[in-house]
Image (tube, rainbow, N blue to C red):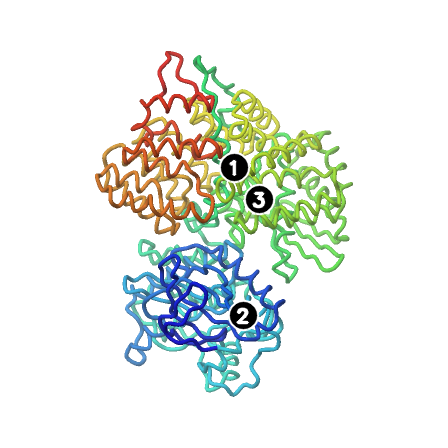
Amino acid sequence: MSLSIGARLGVYEILGTLGAGGMGEVYRARDTRLHREVALKILPETFARDRDRLARFEREAQVLASLNHPNIAQIYGLEESTGVPALVMEFVPGQTLEEVMRRLPSGTGLPLQQALGIARQIATALDAAHEAGIVHRDLKPANVKVRDDGTVKVLDFGLAKAVTATDQGSGPSSGSAPVDSPTYAASAMTQVGSVVGTAAYMAPEQARGRTVDKRADIWSFGVILFEMLTGQRLFAGDTVADTIAAVLTRDLDVTMLPADVPPHVLTLIQRCLDRDPKRRLRDIGEAEHQLDPSVSSSALRAPGATTPSQMSAAVVVRRRRVLLWVAGILAVVGISAGALRWERRQPTPEPASTSAPVAAPHAIAVLPFVNQSGNADDEYFSDGMTDELASALMKVQGLRVAARSSAFTFKGKNTDARVVGSALHVASVVEGTVRRAGSKLRVTVQLVNTTDGLAIWSDRYEREAKDVFSVQDDITGAIVSALQLTLSPASDARAHETRAVNPEAHDLYLRGRFLMLKQTEDSLHKALDYFQQAIAKAPDYAPPYAGISFAWAWLADAYIPPNEAEPKAKAAALKALALDPTSTEARTMLAMILWIYDWDGTASREEFRRALQADQNSMDAHVLYAITLCVSNRWSEGLAHAERAITLDPLNAWPSWTREQCLTHARRYDEAIAQHKKTEELDPNFFYLDSFVGIAYREKKMFAESAAEYERVRQVTGEPVAGLAVTYASMGRTTEAREILGQFLEKAKRRYVSPEQVATIYASLGDKDNAFVWLEKAYQARSAFLATSIMSAPYDPVRSDPRFRALLRKMNLYPRSDGRPWT
């Protein structure tokens, strides 16, 4: 269907054409409702005639719309007007990378720094998408836009899969079409078992029609980087068949690369273009790090040769992207920091046993088991088996087990055990593979000494898949025996109890947990569905209830008003504990909910103590308890728990960030700034709730540094940042502060936004009346932001107002023992 300029499609007015592709015609349009330009892809008429296909495509589009990243062109939604379906996307001005390179003299590549800068932004986009479980499948220069300011946007993320799911039998009709022809582009997205992608940039396994994962994108990335540097196609032919043959057989010729290409970039390209996906670079986040201008030419090493210092750098811990933290951990942290009961007397100190690290005679890390099933969808099973084995070992008295977050930073990296030992301070590591085929299960596992890299023990288990619990028991017993430890009677009894669990319920729980840990809105809702299915199979199985509690809590404040989600989270936590009083996850969850929802500090602290008595090595419990203590003005105790969490999980930015938050609330700003440097080393993109170093800079009148920090956050998240508005207001730049305020107010019309974020901006602008209107809204919603931030510096402008003390009383946040509010 062709549309003329000035035509209307729903609320969209056509402004011009942008081109045509495999999915139909693309138009530049104006959204007359939101007053912004968009790109409209008019989908083929076959979609309009087949409602089932359109519904499947819409479900895929909803997943893709969850990607919100500054280097990814946003998908806004699916519009259907007068029977014409159209995909509504962000309009990105500028040239495609293909157009940029086409304008170069023949055989000439881009300048080195420009090429590396573009590549790094592409890698950043891929990393964010891969963390969300989305693979591009058709990455090529035509799908990369370069704006005039140098910002790179990757287009059509995941649409190859979306079309594949709906477009039956659309593969190439012959091998004679030119590689760049519209005919081939239109037919390149086909059913599973057919070729999906664009020939010159597809991975070998993709060219063979096999199932692909994120490593196919990494191959395409390597091809694009090579082309940018050389100005020549790596794989080219007169026909599609010729090009595919080149992909499958032609070796990389490194002599084609310019002489000024650094050795570490050359190594990166070679690793991206390994034909064997198992040997290929496994994590695009590593490429992102290596393309940083600050990385030396010797930084990139072959797998297994990474140095300990590199293991603590951002490349190791980029697994959790900022948006996943904002969307997923928002409520977890906020809940624990939420409902504060301020004591009229000085608080009594916590027992020293919870604040000091416990020296264990043995320390071990369980590295993520490798999924060898040949099906990427089985990743949930290998990850779940890793988690359950680690959980079982945590119950062994005298054994310290490295936290999951730090252990999983090594997923897919084939890292030498000695490096892991140095990074995690463990004496041994458990490595393994899992292969599940039908009803059969094969697990290989070994225990490796981190001093010399030699195996202490290894074995292989071939069982029925339903016997997974007995396999885990056998592995646990063998490891305990090899380390000359002893299983406690309680642990052994617990093992016998878990063996009685319905295997179907257990599998559904693992699927739900895998999705829950992705921490996106869509994955959390899908996780809830799996947990409910597990409960239907086994009503007395506790773990799904704990999962439901976590999922609802993570949805709270990020996507759903807390007073809607928290009661469900609390009920699930109580049910989990009724079924299994030893569940540290459920106990920690309940402790947080008692703060944020019941506002019962005494009961919450008791639950945190009980959780830590059951598991002194629970990083989550230490972090969340630290936040509640620090916001309650119990600085020494809170900081001790934060430091214990850092010891337990040294490669995770969250514990370091927690210490940063505590120091900021204590108004120890110089120490907070110093701690932020450590957080940044672990993950330079880590962000949640507010930038505490931004607050520290602002309170020290270092406004330029504060604004720069918040601008960085805004670039990373692609969202308005309340802290930046507060800094602008402090600088006297009220126009810019009000502009950000307007963005929040507009967003609040469309979906839930924490009212506290709006209140803090009004407070900084001196508009007390509106500040208290929005503080009351936050109170009614029981926003975690409110309880976390109410005693911090941004509310100093309204602290003397009688309405502020009234709000504290309603929240059970009492003044100090001398009768004055805390300041």
Q: Which mark is in front, 1 or 2?
A: 2
Residue drawn at the location 46% of the way across and 73% of the way down: 201
Q: Residue at x 44, y 20 (%)?
A: 809
* Number of marks in the rendered image: 3
Residue that label 2 marks: 83
Q: Position of residue 615 (x, y in %)?
A: 59, 30
Q: Residues within 10 Å of mark 3 (few under 14, many from 20)?
A: many
Position of 563 compared to 286: left or right?
right
- Secondary structure under tag 2 reads loop
Outermost residue to the left: 732
Which of the marked residues, 3 or 2, is nearer the chain's N terminus?
2
Q: Residue 60's x, y, as percent? A: 55, 61
Residue bearing the label numbered 1: 562
> Which residue sits at x=63%, y=33%?
573
**Vertical placement of 316 versus 143: above or below?**
above
- Image quarter where the C terminus lies is top left
Q: Amino acid at mark 1?
A: Pro
In the picture of the structure, the residue carrying the numbered disc 3 is: 429
Q: Amino acid at mark 3?
A: Val
